[in-house]
Amino acid sequence: MSEFEPIIVAFACEYCAYTAADMAGSLGMSYPPNVKIIRVPCTGKVDTLHLMRALQKGADGVLVAGCHLGDCHYKNGNLRAQQRVDYVSRLLEEIGIGGQRVMMTFMSAGQGNVFAQVANEFTEKIRNLGPNPVKLGAGKAAA
Amino acid sequence: MITAVRKPLEEIMGFAAPYSRVLLLGCNECVTVCYAGGRKEVGILASALSMAFLKEGKKLDIVEQTLERQCDPEYVEEIAQTIDQYDAVFSMACGCGVQTVAGRYKDKPVYPMVNTMFMGASERQGVWAERCAGCGDCVLGRTGGICPVARCSKRIFNGPCGGSTKGKCEIDPGVDCAWQLIWDRLKALGRTDLYSEIIPAKDWRSAKDGGPRRIVREDLLS
């Protein structure tokens, strides 16, 4: 029986989270290859639409990783991202996909260990949740 | 602008149930500004609807398009060539737009995707409040720029009622007493004489009370 390997899309801000991910890599802290990182200048650039399209196109989970609140290089981009993630979470509950498939997380550039830990934990959580129901349905719809 | 809020997804999914291919039509004006029905909101709703349907193993083809406005026939005409491809049109515009589209494409079911709310203005990012009731006989010059029709719960015209407490309306502690606002503004302007001028009983025939209204500009007719 093949085990389900979730596809996780992680939007990581250049100033903190992406640098943390980079640090995790250079310090040899492993995180699952399931996590596909998309670098953004600030998580405030990540729009509600980006989160929705990621899931619509087959991501099983979407992570948004930014600077700690109060430390955003662009003042409050991470706060905006948090609000959007919350909005999408509620929307996903409404349509029955499950609000847990999107998550916001905060870290500083030096916290490579945090990135690795969050990446591992989120991947595990999504693995337990199972594949994005959209993909299962798409198979049925195509048939 | 005209403000609106997207309808609950459950209601929209109910509309979509009988169809397999719909046009989700956004509007680039008022509903864009209040984040209810612009190009981005079309994308978000299309994504949500598509996922909701796929989850059930059903396929709903959603074509996304946003017109400049849906309340002018010239813009609504833009979809004339492609409308036959769709089972229904889901309009994210305000009621004005939905009706214009429905009126032009009479044999196509047209559904509203938003609940149109009020004519209002931004108080700050993410907050809109009612400002204008479209009464057809504007008294803002006499009330320091605060509207007693739209902002007074009782629409009274000569000072606050007994329910005005600490500047708030008795219907809700979050609602300002319009007449308190008017008094404060006229005082700041040094025009409390305007407050003393009695505004006679309003002729409501120029408002909604007089029936559906129309403006005809003879100088613009072709």
Image: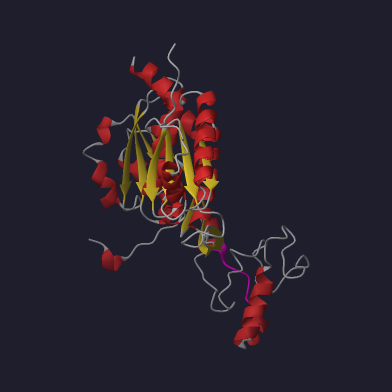
Quadrant of the image occupied by residue B174: bottom right
**Relative to B213, B87 lies left or right:** left
- Expressed as whole percent of the image width and height from the top left, the position of residue A119 reads 49, 37
In the displayed structure, A135 sits above or below A73; it is above
Relative to the observer, which residue lies in front, B7 or B103? Answer: B7
**Relative to B217, B178 lies left or right:** right
In the displayed structure, B163 sits above or below B183; it is above
- Expressed as whole percent of the image width and height from the top left, the position of residue A37 reads 39, 41
Relative to the observer, which residue lies in front, B221 or A62? Answer: A62
In magenta, the rendered stretch is B197-204
Which residue: 39% across, 30% down?
Answer: A58
**Relative to B203, B15 lies left or right:** left
Is residue B8 visible in the rendered image? The answer is no
* Magenta segment includes A109: no
Q: Which residue lies furthest to the top in this view?
A: A1
- Expressed as whole percent of the image width and height from the top left, the position of residue B40 reads 39, 47
